[in-house]
Amino acid sequence: MEIRFDEKNLLADLVGKANGVTRAEAERSQSRVLKALKSFRKKSEQGLYGFPHLPFQAAVIRSIEGYAAELSGSYDTVCVVGIGGSALGAWALDCGIRGPHPVQGAFTPQHPRLVILDNVDPSFTAQALASMDARSTLVVVIAKSGGTAETVGTFLIVREWLEQTLGRRKAVRRIAAVTTEGKGDLYALAQAEGYPRFAIPENVGGRFSVLSPVGLVPAALAGINIRKLARGAVAMTHFCWQPDIEQNLALKAALYHWLIWTRKNKTIHVAFPYSNHLWGTAFWFRQLWAESLGKTHDRNGKVVHTGQTPIAALGTTDQHSQVQLYIEGPNDKVLTFWAVNRFSAAGRIPSNRVGQPAFDALAGHSLTELIDAERRATAAALAAAERPNCTITLNRVDEEHLGAFLQMMEFETAFLGELLGIDAFDQPGVELGKNFTYGLIGRKGYEKYLREFQAYEKKRSAIR
Ligand code: PA5
């Protein structure tokens, strides 16, 4: 497993003092990041935060593998019902290892497809169900809280759809539940109906749960080697506890991203994978960064309104869509390229010449060379415009590298939470919207939120 972090284009030497950090600044901040590492390690060892321990849980991995092996060949579709942290990890893994859907090829029991029903768009849900056969579909319903409105609503539809074709008794055998053990409405329902259950540890929040059953159950059912994912994550975890910044990529990335954000005021972070396989990971990252680091209060209760807006861009595609803005628009962004050394194909371009300069210049080269040249050229052009950027390079996108990369980004986010003095593991800002929704759909106990919502509507209607 080989992952590298290149921070040089974040340095003042390349992007100027107003937009880049100096080595001296970075050195001066080393004690701060080491403190952040120490305090996060302590909390993790006390059991407050569980994601660092996930890849070491061999018994959990074995039980998921056993479940997938038992059902193997009996389905051609895995339908995940979940949202946010209960959906994005599965997508990152599926897209990372098996590629984006349009290029995955035909779906068979040997090569099942993964359908993720996260959004409650009724057209999307109906079309997804119409595209699946209940007799060859496995449903995995995932919710840590066990009561998320989107997941519950969609699951009731999917459950009825299964029962209408298979009958109640058989339908139950096509459903698995991933939720908190002993808590919540999904747990109670799964227990009452007898679905196989996989537990989400209490100390693992949604966006940090990709290497728990939340990501691993769908991945294993889709045929991904979850043991290798865990192996990569284990190796990365060992590095992430190292106090040596040159060995600890997550800590080094946290240091530079923190400095460039807080000292150079780069309030937007563009994750820029040059790999379609990492596109799902970019969306997973967007949630991790936004929900973890966007907070009103610091740990002392002081109002800080901190946060760095994450954006997902795809190279080279978004060079033809976004880079104009990144180079000439407000200098308020830091870009992190995600590069891949070795693709699963070279993309050889035929060497015969056609007599046209634009075509002949590329003859005999490869898409691997082209994508690499385009990324390096874009990084250089950004640096020339004093736009700070850095590059994380994965030797390849396979299970070990992806497991390691996801774990590295979770560690980096946790370290940043410590550096900013905030709780990176809660999300109080989304509660009010959820409560209004429950009030609006008439959930018992949420009458107060309905009244509050009605008062807001009244205020709106008074506006002329
Ligand atoms: O990261 C988080 O905690 C959230 O994004 C949750 O994953 C999301 O709200 C879904 O929650 P649940 O798994 O309880 O349905």
Image: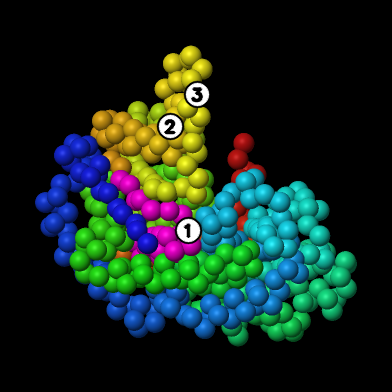
Judging depth in this view, the residue of 236 and 399 nearest the camera is 399
Disc nearest the viewer among 1 and 3 = 3
Residue 206 visible in this rendered orientation of the protein: no
In this rendering, is residue 97 above or below 242?
above
In this rendering, is residue 357 above or below 277?
above
Left or right of residue 316, residue 69 in this image: right
- Could you say whether the residue bearing mark 1 is in a helix, strand or loop? loop
Instruction: Estimate the spatial distance between the alpha carbons at disc 1 and disc 3, rounded to whole Å.
Output: 33 Å
The secondary structure that dominates the magenta segment is helix
Task: Determine crowd level at label 2: few under 14, some 14-19, many 20+ residues with C-alpha closer than 10 A.
Answer: some
Residue, disc 2: 365
Does residue 255 show up magenta in the picture?
Answer: no
Task: Determine crowd level at label 1: few under 14, some 14-19, many 20+ residues with C-alpha closer than 10 A.
Answer: many
Residue, disc 1: 398
The stretch of residues the image draws in magenta is 390-414
Residue type at numbered disc 2 = His
- Could you say whether the residue bearing mark 3 is in a helix, strand or loop? loop
Residue 139 visible in this rendered orientation of the protein: yes
In this rendering, is residue 230 above or below 192?
above
Residue, disc 3: 352
Disc nearest the viewer among 2 and 1 = 2
Q: Quadrant of the C terminus?
A: top right
Disc 2 CB within 8 Å of nearest ligand 1 atom: no
